[in-house]
Image: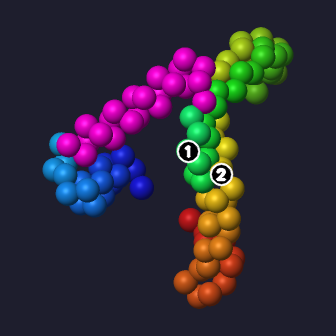
Amino acid sequence: MNKSELIERLAERAGLNVMQAEEIVNLIYRKMRDALVSGGRIEIRGFGSFVVKEYEAYQGRNPKTGEKIEVPPKKLPFFKVGKELKERIDKVEGVDGSREPVSA
């Protein structure tokens, strides 16, 4: 599901027009982004949590030339799946009743 599909589903389920649903989704995205940018954590019980992980600088290598390079420190968002979501996904069976992963 992408953002526009989320907006369409929200509009249908909540009885909103698409513009109202888009405004709500954009507000949620902005608040989540702002929380992460300010170093906060977002926890949605049963779904998962978003945190910002900090990585220190390290010595890397240019794959083309083999030259050593200094990779600067960075911060990246990280998502950890919640227990309920993990368990629910694990229970999903394939169309043929198998529990084999579905290939993309």
Which residue does the image show at 80% across and 21% down from the upper left? 61
Which residue does the image show at 20% across and 43% down from the upper left? 20
Position above or below: 5 against 51: below
What secondary structure is the magenta-colored segment mainly? helix
In this image, 21 relative to 48: left or right?
Answer: left
Q: Position of residue 91 (x, y in %)?
A: 65, 73
**Extent of the magenta region:** 20-41
Q: Specify the label residue 44 is tagged with.
A: 1
Marks 2,1: beta carbons within 8 A: yes
Q: Position of residue 84 (x, y in %)?
A: 64, 59
Q: Residues within 10 Å of mark 2 (few under 14, many from 20)?
A: some
Which residue does the image show at 76% across and 27% down from the upper left? 63
Q: Position of residue 92 (x, y in %)?
A: 61, 74
- What residue is disc 2 on? 82
Position above or below: 84 against 59: below
Q: Position of residue 25 (x, y in %)?
A: 33, 41
